[in-house]
Image: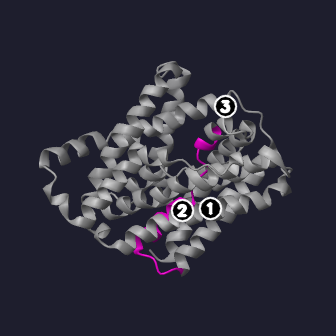
Amino acid sequence: MHESLLVLQAAIPVYLVVLLGAALRRFRVLQPRMDKGLMVLAIHVFCPCLILDKMLAAEVLRDPFVLFSSAGMGFGLIVLGALSAYLMAPLFGLKVGGGRRTFAVSAGLQNYGFIAIPLVAYLYPDNDDVMAVLFTHNLGVELAMWTVLLMLLSGVLSPSWRVFLKGPIVAVLVGMLLMQTGTEQHVPGTMRSLFSMLGVCAIPLSLLLVGTALHDLMGKMKFDWRVGSGAVLVRLALIPLVILVCAKCLPLGTELKQVLIIQAALPSGMFPIVLSRHYGGRTDVAITAVMATTIASLLTMPLVIAFGKYWVGV
């Protein structure tokens, strides 16, 4: 119980900033026309700076096993989660077509960045290694999302090399290269100070944008209780169990196990809403999954993280 309260204490600031974002949208302080510019700023400026700031201080990234195991687990668990959701979708009335594929991607892909990053920051404030491992893990997630999940959703075998041009992925690859070659020490102190200064903006801005997106979804959704309950069951019960078993049983580093515990507790990511709109999925299914799991995670997230830390032993 004590561990659950500590996790809840770490999660409360995350929830509050998300609620602030929703309130700012409600009172037209953050208007929809501002979203694109703020999103570009968050994803392609602030997040890369945060990534480089943390990775260049993480000695654990000098170990190639840490790099490959982190990215490999990120890729493999996303694929496993999406396939599990695809197989279970008929139980919730989604037997064929775009609805089943959208459910698989929505329930299989967690909010691996915007929610995970602040949770790691609050739970491990003095451990840059955990944050750095999170970013390498997320590299694997991104690769799975833009290849396997996109092909699953669209039904077309057409992965794009453009995935490697995204700001956060470029930052992770640069950080990995510098740490593996030992050349991070040649990065000027002025640049590292700049990364730190800009990087601190990434978390609050990202959470504000999550809040504005949730506010917008509330006005658009037609909630299907069967799909919503299915998404909660798969995303917040079945998949966390699989991830925690992997963290418990596989010979992984402590930092990666800590990252996996947090990833296990996260609700569905919001990007499947965008993907479903552009690649022939059902946006209503994606919105239902996101809203249901996000609301339910307010209760389950502290419990899953607390249980995971206790059971895995980290």
Side (left or right) of 255 relative to 231:
left
Examine the rendered structure and indicate whether residue 291 appears above or below residue 169: above
Q: Residue at point 64% right, 69% down?
A: 241
Region rendered in magenta: 250-273
Q: Which residue is mark 2?
A: 75
Residue kind at label 1, given as amino acid type = Val
Q: Which mark is residue 125?
A: none
Q: Earlier in the sequence, mark 2 or mark 3?
A: 2
Across and down, in percent, residue 84 comes to: 72, 63
- Do labels 3 and 1 touch, CB within 8 Å? no
Picture quadrant where residue 193 is located:
top left
Q: Please tell me whether mark 3 or mark 1 is closer to you in this view.
A: 1
Across and down, in percent, residue 311 comes to: 54, 76
Q: Which residue is mark 3?
A: 218
Side (left or right) of 85 relative to 40:
right
Residue neighbourhood size for the residue with mark 3, other residues' Cα within 10 Å, grouped as few (<14), some (14–19), many (≥20): few
Side (left or right) of 106 relative to 243:
right
Residue neighbourhood size for the residue with mark 2, other residues' Cα within 10 Å, grouped as few (<14), some (14–19), many (≥20): many
Q: Which residue is mark 1?
A: 79
Taking depth in this image into account, of 204 and 164 the one nearest to the observer is: 164
Taking depth in this image into account, of 184 and 217 the one nearest to the observer is: 184
Taking depth in this image into account, of 126 and 171 the one nearest to the observer is: 171
Q: Residue at point 34% right, 40% down?
A: 46
Q: Residue at point 46% right, 34% down?
A: 208
Q: Quadrant of the C terminus?
A: bottom left
Residue 257 within the segment the image draws in magenta: yes
- Do labels 1 and 2 touch, CB within 8 Å? yes
Residue kind at label 3, given as amino acid type = Met
Distance from disc 3 to disc 1, alpha carbons, whole Å, reads: 29 Å
Side (left or right) of 58 relative to 73:
left
